[in-house]
């Protein structure tokens, strides 16, 4: 029997990259999936591909801005209405931007923090009552930028570092009630976020390479493999961890 038969998982940021890769692998392992993103077209493509790969599970979706409190609450409610329960929440959606910190305007700072950190909080808060009922799991996607300095990425680093800390706090607070929470810190993953991005004038690329994998880049499927493990019964005794998948970048 596939690992996720009769399990319900909610994945944010599923229109591409890590979120899409995790959706595909989970569908093939029998999961029921509720997937969200702000990019409607990409989300539709993910659902179509996941339905073709599905191994007995069902895939539902909803266009959602996780930084909007009402939309975050509505997506969790829609998931539970569709499937009757929730076993795992994967907070994957995120945005990235590079700026000289002394030149960064507050709106740009707030945009990154609102999606990456506020969105993770809002989805988690809405999901917690259901996850406590199922004694489920949370898998948050952080970054090596939350564990070491990312030049020109102060807002991104701040948001991801906070996600790792938030995950540990949740793991401790709810351990006695059967909930597990872990975070993943990827680096050098080939996704839309890592493709050529506008850099500030005079950026020193040697500083950015400090967080690069020593094995070279890899695909989002490798992160998806870790998401599936942490969401499964195989990881039943793992909670409060931040697990790097970075090709020895921070070793």
Image (tube, rainbow, N blue to C red):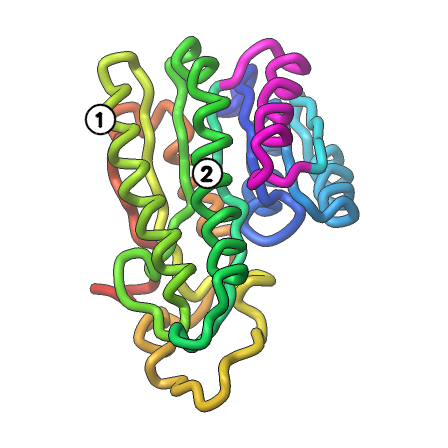
- Vertical comparison of 137 with 22: above or below: above
* Picture residue at 68% right of the left edge, 15% below the top: 82
- In the picture, measured across the screen, residue 15 lies left or right of residue 99, that is right
**Mark 1 or mark 2, earlier in chain:** 2
Quadrant for the C terminus, please.
Answer: bottom left
Whole-percent x and y of residue 149?
28, 67
* Quadrant assignment, res 100: bottom left
Q: Of helix, strand and loop, which one carries label 1?
A: helix
Majority SS type along the magenta span: helix
Q: CA distance from mark 1 to mark 2?
A: 17 Å
Mark 2 burial class by Cα count in 10 Å: few <14, some 14-19, many 20+: many
* Residue on which the image places disc 2: 120
* Picture residue at 52% right of the left edge, 51% below the top: 94
- Vertical comparison of 18 with 10: above or below: below
* Residue on which the image places disc 1: 172
* Quadrant assignment, res 67: top right
* Picture residue at 50% right of the left edge, 87% below the top: 201
Count of numbered marks: 2
**Span of residues in magenta:** 64-86
Magenta span contains residue 69:
yes
Q: Of helix, strand and loop, which one carries label 2?
A: helix
- Vertical comparison of 191 with 205: above or below: above
- In the picture, measured across the screen, residue 128 lies left or right of residue 38, that is left
């Amino acid at each position: 029997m596939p690992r996720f038969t009769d399990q319900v998982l909610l994945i944010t940021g599923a229109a591409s990259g890590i979120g899409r890769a995790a959706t595909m692998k989970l569908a093939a392992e029998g999961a029921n999936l509720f997937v969200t993103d702000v990019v409607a077209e990409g989300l539709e493509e993910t659902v179509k591909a996941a339905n073709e790969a599905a191994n007995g599970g069902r895939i539902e979706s909803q266009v959602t801005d996780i930084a909007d409190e009402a939309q975050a609450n509505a997506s969790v409610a829609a998931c539970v209405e569709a499937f009757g329960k929730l076993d795992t929440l994967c907070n994957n959606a995120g945005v990235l931007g590079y700026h000289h910190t002394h030149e960064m305007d507050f709106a740009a700072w707030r945009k990154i923090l609102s999606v990456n950190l506020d969105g993770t909080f809002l989805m988690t808060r809405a999901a917690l009552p259901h996850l406590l009922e199922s004694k489920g799991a949370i898998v948050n996607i952080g970054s090596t930028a939350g564990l070491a300095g990312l030049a020109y990425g102060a807002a991104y680093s701040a948001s991801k570092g906070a996600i790792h800390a938030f995950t540990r706090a949740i793991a401790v607070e709810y351990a006695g009630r059967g909930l597990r929470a872990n975070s993943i810190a990827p680096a050098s993953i080939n996704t839309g976020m890592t493709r050529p991005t506008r850099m500030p004038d005079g950026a020193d690329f040697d500083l950015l390479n400090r967080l690069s994998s020593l094995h070279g880049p890899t695909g989002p499927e490798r992160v998806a493999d870790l998401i599936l493990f942490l969401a499964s019964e195989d990881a039943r005794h793992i909670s409060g961890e931040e697990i790097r998948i970075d090709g020895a970048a921070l070793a």
